């Protein structure tokens, strides 16, 4: 018969480790100054004695749950299928484990009434100490609701939160498109179309500024006809965009896409019509999803460091939860050159 597990308290663990009760408490809660020697001794006893602090008691004492919520917010019912969010979640999980945090995933509904119900539920249940919103399309009223109820929130993706104290973590979209445009210009390609996604509402202007800046440096006149807004990455939709817009532009020799999936479907459509990529038209994506290197041809793209986005979101949220000063975090964009771009012949 197995031995009955001993019931330990902070006092009994402190006695076994030869330290004070407050030292054990600081080690468990990862707070205060504790020498490395004392920390190792306490952790060794905890492991040996299989002592698991009572989470409910700790929560009552600190008024914290050690849970952070994650909510995906997009109007696409297949929002979670977007491959960039897997890597963002990896970053969130990696940083959360360092701080012994639990993750609570909330899924949004397509119906607005259900979305509203979810936001009130998050406020009412008080199951999380803070919330990471992935996607910048959450209605301002919901962000205001969280702020008015003192729920710390961080957004992944650029968002104007007006006077609310809600920071965001994002990639430098302007610099990313600037680098993409400059690369195409260096290849002798001057007739460059920029496909902008309406889903990227809050950073469309950033991308456009990067595009214009690269053109201005080469004294190339901006042509608004080269800016095309799209509402979907769907291949059938992309085919209509190619037929009704892109192929009507004379001498086009390069396209910058809002994301990699859009670029992949664009390449499929234009190559099916006998247009060679990269020789006739060079194509650049945005995000650098895991499969981009395996596209045909391998995709030149602007890389977002998705794991770092997740890590920085958790770090920023923890600072807010602890009452520390926070600000927006903007990460560098990197151009990854592969086979979908080549010099103009």
Image: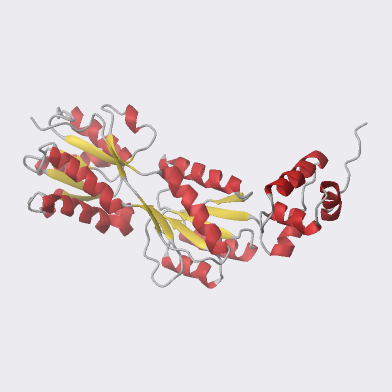
Locate residue 91 relative to residue 344 in the image: left or right: right
Residue 275 percent coordinates (x, y): 14, 30
Asked if residue 109 can be seen in this view, the reply is no
Total count of labels: 0
Specify the quadrant that holds the C terminus. top left
Residue 294, above or below 183: above
Residue at coordinates 50% horizontally, 41% vertically from top-left? Answer: 90
Judging depth in this view, the residue of 28 and 52 nearest the camera is: 28
How is the rendered protein coloured?
secondary structure
Asked if residue 63 can be seen in this view, the reply is yes
Residue 26 percent coordinates (x, y): 71, 56
Locate residue 23 relative to residue 165 in the image: left or right: right
Residue 265, above or below 223: above
Locate residue 328 relative to residue 301 in the image: left or right: right
Judging depth in this view, the residue of 105 and 5 nearest the camera is: 5
Residue at coordinates 31% horizontally, 29% vertically from top-left? Answer: 295
Judging depth in this view, the residue of 19 and 338 nearest the camera is: 19
Judging depth in this view, the residue of 207 and 41 nearest the camera is: 41
Residue 45 percent coordinates (x, y): 79, 43
Residue at coordinates 61% horizontally, 50% vertically from top-left? Answer: 99
Residue 283 percent coordinates (x, y): 21, 36
Specify the quadrant that holds the N terminus. top right
Residue 63 picture quarter: bottom right
Residue at coordinates 17% horizontally, 54% vertically from top-left? Answer: 213
Seen from this angle, which residue lies furthest right? 1
């Amino acid at each position: 018969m197995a031995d009955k597990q001993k019931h330990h308290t902070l006092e009994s663990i402190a006695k076994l480790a030869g330290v004070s009760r407050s030292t054990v408490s600081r080690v468990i809660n990862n707070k205060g100054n504790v020498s490395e020697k004392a920390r190792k001794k306490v952790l060794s006893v905890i492991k040996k004695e299989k002592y698991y602090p009572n989470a409910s008691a700790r929560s009552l004492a600190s008024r914290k749950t050690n849970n952070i919520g994650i909510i995906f917010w997009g109007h696409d019912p297949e929002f979670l299928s977007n491959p960039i969010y897997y890597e963002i979640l990896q970053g969130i999980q990696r940083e959360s484990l360092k701080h012994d945090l639990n993750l609570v995933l909330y899924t949004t509904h397509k119906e607005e009434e259900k979305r509203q119900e979810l936001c009130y539920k998050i406020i009412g249940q008080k199951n999380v100490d803070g919330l990471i919103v992935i996607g910048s399309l959450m209605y301002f009223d919901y962000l205001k609701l969280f702020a008015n109820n003192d729920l710390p929130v961080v957004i992944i993706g650029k968002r104007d939160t007006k006077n609310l104290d809600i920071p965001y973590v994002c990639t430098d979209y302007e610099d990313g498109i600037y680098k993409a445009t400059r690369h195409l210009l260096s290849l002798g390609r001057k007739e460059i179309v920029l496909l902008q996604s309406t889903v990227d509402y809050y950073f469309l202007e950033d991308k456009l500024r990067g595009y214009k800046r690269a053109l201005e440096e080469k004294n190339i006149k901006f042509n608004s006809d080269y800016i095309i807004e799209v509402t979907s990455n769907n291949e059938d939709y992309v085919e209509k965009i190619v037929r009704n817009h892109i192929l009507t532009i004379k001498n086009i020799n390069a396209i910058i896409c809002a994301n990699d999936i859009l670029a992949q479907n664009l390449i499929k459509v234009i190559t099916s019509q006998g247009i060679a990529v990269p020789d006739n038209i060079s194509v650049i994506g945005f995000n650098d999803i895991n499969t981009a290197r395996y596209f045909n041809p391998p995709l030149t793209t602007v890389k977002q460091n998705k794991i770092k986005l997740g890590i920085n979101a958790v770090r920023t949220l923890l600072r807010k939860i602890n009452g520390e000063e926070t600000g927006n975090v903007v990460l560098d964009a990197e151009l990854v050159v592969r086979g979908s771009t080549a010099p103009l012949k």
